Amino acid sequence: MQEPARQAAIVWPLAVYFFLVVLLAAAAVVTSWLLGQRHRDKSTNEPYESGVIPTGSARLRMSAKYYLIAMFFVIFDLEAAFIFAWSVDFRELGWAGYGGMMIFIAVLVATLVYLWGQGALAGGTVERKTYARRSR
């Protein structure tokens, strides 16, 4: 067990550093408050859009299709990262790794074909295929 004087000798540089960081942060906040502008014009709190006067609300409703395509992009992009990692190490993985990656790519292609067939990747409005039930 270390004696208290030795422990203090180890900890004091950290305490000084912490104090200096807090002092610097406080000085930055106080200097900003002292030198900052204090005016309340009507246009102070309005957004500035490159000189264009804003009209209407900034809260636009986006179509769910937009988010769906964004999710597909993220999913397929992540799969590309897996394929890249496999390609870096493919010689050590051998035929088992090759077969596993071919199954993985086949599942990806099947998913892409299915989504394409359902019209999920179309940018505009596309009616999905509906199959009528046959009555017996």
Image: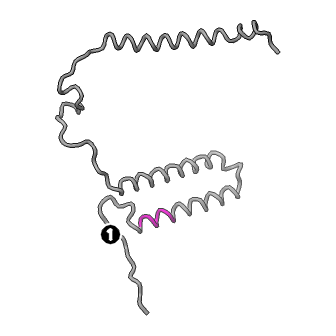
Which is more toward the observer, 8 or 80?
8
**Range of the magenta residues?**
110-116
Specify the amino acid type for callout 1.
Glu
Q: Residue furthest front?
A: 4
- 115 part of magenta stretch: yes
Quadrant (top left, top right, bottom left, bottom right) of the N terminus: top right
Percent position of residue 59, x then y: 28, 44
Q: Looking at the image, how many numbered discs can be counted on the residues?
A: 1
Residue at 58%, 11% in the rendered image: 17
- 89 is higher (above) or lower (below) than 95: above
Q: Give the residue at mark 1.
A: 127
- 38 is higher (above) or lower (below) than 67: above
Which is more toward the observer, 63 or 12?
12
Which is more toward the observer, 110 or 98?
110
Residue at 62%, 49% in the rendered image: 86
- Secondary structure under tag 1 reads loop
**Relative side of 44 to 99, left or right:** left
Quadrant (top left, top right, bottom left, bottom right) of the C terminus: bottom left
Residue at 63%, 13% in the rendered image: 14
Percent position of residue 12, x then y: 65, 9
Mark 1 packing: few (<14 Cα in 10 Å), some, or many (20+)? Answer: few
Percent position of residue 48, x then y: 23, 30
**Relative side of 92 to 60, left or right:** right
Q: Which residue lies furthest to the right in this view?
A: 1
What secondary structure characterizes most of the magenta part? helix
- 66 part of magenta stretch: no
Residue at 57%, 13% in the rendered image: 18
- 69 is higher (above) or lower (below) than 56: below
